[in-house]
Amino acid sequence: MQLEDSLRIAPASTPGATEVLKNNDIFLVSLPDSSIPAGYPGGLGLYFRDTRFLSRHELLLNGYQPILLSSGVRFSHFCQCDLTNPEIRNEEGKLLAPMESLHLRLLRFINGALHQRLRLTNYGYQTTRLTLLLKLGADYRDIFELRGTLRPKRGAILPFCAGREGLAFRYQGLDNQTRRTMIIWDPVPEDVLAEGDDVALVYHLELHPKDRAYFYWRIIPELETEPAGLIIVKEGDLRASFTRLAAQQKKAYYHWYESCTRLESDRPRINQMLNQALSDLWILQTRYPEGLGIDAGIPWYATLFGRDALITAWQILPINPDLARETLRLLACYQGKTLDPVREEEPGKIIHEIRRGEMANCHEILHTPYYGSIDSTLWFIILLGDYIIWSKDLHFLEEMRSPLQAALDWCCNYGDKDGDGYIEYEGSRHGGLQNQGWKDSWDGVPDTEGKPVQPPIALVEVQGYLYAAYRRACHLFSLLKERDQANFYARKAADLRQRFLKDFWVRKGNYLGLALDGNKRLIPTVASNMGQVLFTGILPPQKARQVADRLFSRDMFSGWGIRTLSRREKAYNPISYHNGSVWPHDNSIIAMGLRYYGFLREVQELASALYDAALRFPYFRLPELFCGFDRRPFASPIRYPVACEPQAWATGSILALLQACLGLKCTTEGLIIQSPLLPTGIQELYLSGMRIHGAKVELEFVRRNGHILCFPTKREGELKITIAT
């Protein structure tokens, strides 16, 4: 099956859904009918560097709003929206256009700017005279304002300026930067009407039967470096550049696609889901001044998050190991250098989040960058270790030698504040995060009474990460031929493993508790955090078996995935952010742990559940999270209302779940494929172009007589492949 065929059909938009486009550090979120209505709640708009540069975009025909026929985004970057008209009459009641006699097709993509082409066709039997309005506005709200942060003062919206070639909205920020939104057009509108700070572009047109009219707009968000002058556009430039830049964008996507492991099954919908994940990973990448990064999610987290980027790169190592290398290199640039208690920076610590908008520039928020993450540093070490095993890139290991040591020093010193061998956090005293694990909402770490756990808090999964980090450090220093260092971290890992069960195991119930509180008391809350411990290997097999059984009990497993919190807990709420919802990335990490211990039935059940869920969401795309209600016959998973879509580690989950099923394991000796599985319903799966140890390999997985067989069909370069059943 060709790529174009696998992406031909997209699910219809669902209530509350939006269409998303992104390229580099510009992204657009609109309603499916292409509109951004004035005053619409939520995060609709065109954004650049954490600021909304376009807050209104409404098309009207003679004052009537067009009717949506369909909309869809191809390869996550090219949108087509088809609209038609209601019955249009003038003020005297004369019929100007019968219902559904006009067709509007809006094409849009982002390539350094938002590019749009509208084609308006008259399919009626009579000549039609119409007035087309495009209403535009720019409020220049910081993303944190849109998320609810109140500002005592804002900058000033400046009067727009207009010329024959276009117009410019402008805003003078409190950070002394002028932001502007350039609107370049072809053809020139008959009039530009002011509506407060917004404008309406007015086009009068006459369309004979079967006639078409074309309109082009380029919307450019930028930081003004010189007095606002309008770009001089020659006649026809927008038309020619629209086609050229769209082709350039498509070529860039195919370059990314060819660099990834290609995945093809015998089920077209599964192929679309897998290819959607690849295209989402492409648009979520952003080129920062220091290097290439993976943004966490759209719209709220379209920036670099340490934890999210590292986990996503880890999830997709078999698909594109280059992203792991670039992510590690970028985060090393931001690695903590000094002690700053306000931003929680400490030497060797990896960032939580960085922002580049007006509020960050004015230090109204801490994200310049902000370091309030207890586990990003651990994931930095884990990813580095796994990337080196996967790639054998020893030159890169030498490059990362200093950041690796700094990260490990942070673990032993600043991360372990009381010297008990565990990593804990106290929470911010300066307006940052109170919870600093991956469940970082204010109520995301509850005790059995539903109240927030008292800090300092040692989360159960963080200690598992620490064990995994020490184990990988031992291996990395062995490769660097530093035996003393290798032995030191081997001893640290062994000591941690010996003490871990004594402190975190809940004997009444046989499972791992959520955390140790500030008094070193075990918090026995039943949460998914215990499942993330599995991939680290810190548990003996019999204890891992008991953890797996607890995760798949009815109060934890919804049928669509494992909940973040047991429905027996007082804090349980299936519509909450962290206390009973289902997070795909959480489930994918658990699946990797289930595979580690050989719990194959559970791996297949979990992967099949998440794949079934994905097939019921728009574009077969897993959102950041969804509600934790039980699965019912003939029902779909229930959307969480403000989840990011696409979101990086949810996207990576699709691919990590597949890795867990296939039993792909890289060692220093080569590739091991152990007891492969396929999600329910898939009979055949092909992987091609998978890069490992500098070689390339193609694999075929086939279901025969209830067993999954694997056949290496091609390899380029030297690579040992072992198939174990």
Image (tube, helix red, strand yellow):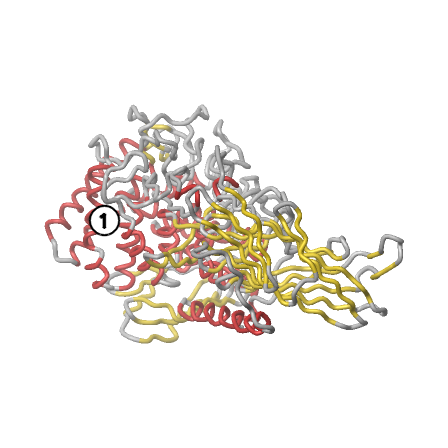
Q: Horizontal and vertical percent for residue 276? A: 51, 61
The residue depicted at 12 percent of the width and 57 percent of the height is 481
Q: Horizontal and vertical percent for residue 709? A: 42, 66
Outermost residue on the left side: it is 484
Whether residue 543 is visible? no
Q: Is residue 537 above or below residue 476?
A: above
Whether residue 618 is visible? yes
**Quadrant where the C terminus is found in the figure:** bottom left
Q: Horizontal and vertical percent for residue 224? A: 45, 55
Q: Which residue is mark 1?
A: 471
Q: Quadrant of residue 457?
A: top left
Total marks placed = 1
Q: Amino acid at mark 1?
A: Arg
Residue nearest the viewer, comparing 624 with 718: 624
Residue nearest the viewer, comparing 330 with 640: 330
Q: Is residue 678 above or below residue 171?
A: below
Residue nearest the viewer, comparing 282 with 379: 282
Q: Viewed as shown, does residue 486 lie left or right of 288?
A: left
Q: Is residue 413 above or below residue 446?
A: below
Secondary structure under tag 1 reads helix
The residue depicted at 26 percent of the width and 54 percent of the height is 385
Q: Horizontal and vertical percent for residue 155? A: 49, 41
Q: Quadrant of residue 99?
A: bottom right
Label 1 environment density (alpha carbons within 10 Å; few <14, some 14–19, many ≥20) = many
